[in-house]
Image (spheres, rainbow, N blue to C red):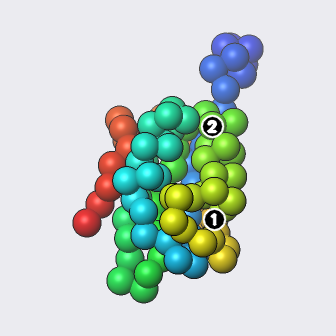
Amino acid sequence: MSGVTKAAGVLKSVDYEVFGRVQGEPYTEDEARKMGVVGWVKNTRQGTVTGQVQGPEDKVNAMKSWLSKVGSPSSRINRTNFSNEKEISKLDFTGFSTRY
């Protein structure tokens, strides 16, 4: 049984908040879909971008890297905080969406 679970890969969930000159949720949504992760993104009143990413561990890690280093074309990322990172048994979302 553990071989089957391992073959499927570990599912991860992580919350994030990106600080700097960052207001570009359409880019985050597009990137998440390309990478094959699910979750959500939202611009905050404080000028940050917050959200949650879920998916296979390697894809979540790739998205974390994108959120930390790349971001939308016009963004300038000062720092990215990740919290509540954990293994999950199933995805809570079916796609990636923008919340308002």
Image quadrant where residue 3 sits? top right
| Residue drawn where x is 67% and y is 43% of the image | 62
Do labels 2 and 1 touch, CB within 8 Å? no
Q: Locate the C terminus by quadrant.
A: bottom left
Query: Disc 1 designates what residue?
Result: 82
Q: Horizontal and vertical percent for residue 28?
A: 46, 52
Q: Quadrant of residue 23?
A: bottom left
Mark nearer the N terminus (2 vs 1): 2
Where 3 falls versus 28 (above or below)?
above
Q: Residues within 10 Å of mark 2 (few under 14, many from 20)?
A: some
Instruction: Point out the residue furthest to the front here.
Output: 74
Taking the spot 29% from the left edge, 60% from the top edge, the residue there is 99
Q: Secondary structure at mark 2?
A: helix
Residue type highlighted by circle 1 = Phe
What residue does disc 2 label? 59
Image quarter (top left, top right, bottom left or bottom right) of the N terminus: top right
Where does residue 36 sit, x and y in percent of width and height?
Answer: 51, 32
* Amino acid type for the residue under numbered disc 2: Lys
Say if residue 81 shows up in the picture.
Answer: no
- Mark 1 element type: strand
| Relative vertical location of residue 79 with respect to residue 27 in this rendering, above or below | below
Q: Residue reaching furthest bottom?
A: 46
Q: Is residue 14 left or right of residue 5?
A: left
Q: Nearer the viewer, residue 54 or 32?
A: 32
- In the displayed structure, would residue 66 be above or below residue 60? below
Identity of the residue drawn at 44% across and 52% down? 27
The quadrant holding residue 88 is top right
Question: What crowding class fits label 1: few (fewer than 14 Cα within 10 Å), some (14-19), or many (20 or more)?
Answer: some
Residue found 42% across the figure and 85% down from its top: 46
